[in-house]
Amino acid sequence: MAKRKYHGQCPLCGREATLTRDHVPPDGIFLPPKPNNLITVRTCRSCNEGSKLDDEYFRICAAVSWSPSEAQWRLWNEKVMGSLQRSPKLNAMLVHMMDAVQEEHKRKPLRFSDGTELTAEQAALTLPLLKSRIDATIEKIVRCLYYAESGSVLSQDLSFDISMEHAGETRYQTCLANPRLVVGTHREFVYYFDRLSPAPESSWLLWFYERQLFRATLTPSQPGLHIAAQSATRAS
Ligand SMILES: [Zn+2]
C-alpha cells in the first residue's frame, strides 16, 4: 500500500509542502525499546532531512554530563560510540575541540557556573559542544511541540533565547515535578511550558535523561531593528 501523502504547512519553516512524519525530540536519543508515546509531527522533507546531522550532534549532548546516569552511559555506549565510528570527521572535530579546551584551561582556568575552578582532570574530560548547533535542535523541538499542542504554527519572527540550566534550582522543581509529558522509561525526555502562547513571552523547559535541562524563552523579534539597519546601510 502506498504511503498517504499529506500536504500542509510545515511547523518548522512555515511553508506549504508535502509533509512527512518526524519525531520530536529526534528518536535517536531514546534507548531501546522505543517508548510507546513518542511525539510525532509532520514536517516538510527539507526540514526533516536537513536536521539529521544536528540530531546526531544533539544525541552526544544528551549522553554526557558531569555525573552521567546509567541510562546516559547506555546511550553513549550503545548509540553515540557507533555513530562516532561511522563519522570520522565528527570524531576528529570533537577530539580537536577537547584539545582546544585543555589548552584554554592552561591559559585561563575554566570554571563551573558556581565559580569553582575545574581541575586539570575535569578539563581533560570536558566535551565542548557548539551552542548554535544544540540551539538549532532545541528550537526545532519547541516549534514541533507547540504545533503538537496547539495545532498552530509558530511565527518565523520569533527570538529563541536558549540556555542550559540547573535542574536542582528551586524555581524549576515544581515545573519538573509536574511536567507536561514524560517520554521513555528512563525519563529520556520531559517537557514543561508555562503558557501556550508566543506573546508577549513564554518559557519552555526541555529535560533530557534528568540531567541536561534547557530553557527556551520565546519573544517576538523586533522587525524595526532590521528596518533601521537597512536605512543605515542606505545612508552610508
Ligand atoms: Zn519545513
Image (cartoon, rainbow, N blue to C red):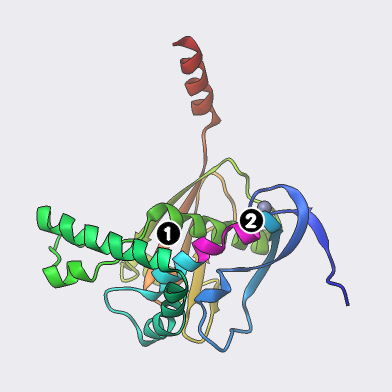
* Residue at the (58%, 40%) spot, across then down: 157
Q: Is residue 2 left or right of residue 224?
A: right
Picture coordinates of residue 229, whole percent (x, y): 48, 22
Magenta stretch in the rendered image: 47-55
Is residue 64 rendered to the left or right of residue 159? left
**SS class of the residue under badge 2?**
helix
The quadrant in which residue 20 appears is bottom right
**SS of the residue under disc 1:** strand
178 and 8: which one is in front? Answer: 8
Report if residue 102 is visible in the image: yes
Q: Is residue 119 magenta?
A: no
Q: Is residue 53 magenta?
A: yes
Please name whichever residue, 111 or 173, is drawn nearer the observer in this view of the structure: 111
The first of marks 1 and 2 along the sequence is: 2
Type of amino acid under label 1: Arg
Residue 8: % across, % down: 79, 54
Other residues around mark 2 within 10 Å, as few (<14) / some (14–19) / many (≥20): some
- Type of secondary structure dominating the magenta stretch: helix
Q: Pointer 1 and pointer 2: residues touching (CB < 8 Å)? A: no
Q: Is residue 203 above or below residue 59?
A: above
Mark 1 against mark 2, which lies toward the viewer? 2
Task: Name the amino acid, label 2.
Answer: Cys
Residue occupying the point 18% across, 71% down: 122
* Quadrant assignment for the C terminus: top left
Mark sitting on residue 47 = 2
Q: Is residue 225 above or below residue 13?
A: above
- Residue 9: x and y in percent read 74, 52
> Number of numbered discs present?
2
Beta carbon at label 2 within 8 Å of ligand 1: yes
> In the figure, residue 196 lies in which quadrant?
bottom right
Which residue position holds label 1?
215
Cα–Cα gap, marks 1 and 2? 23 Å
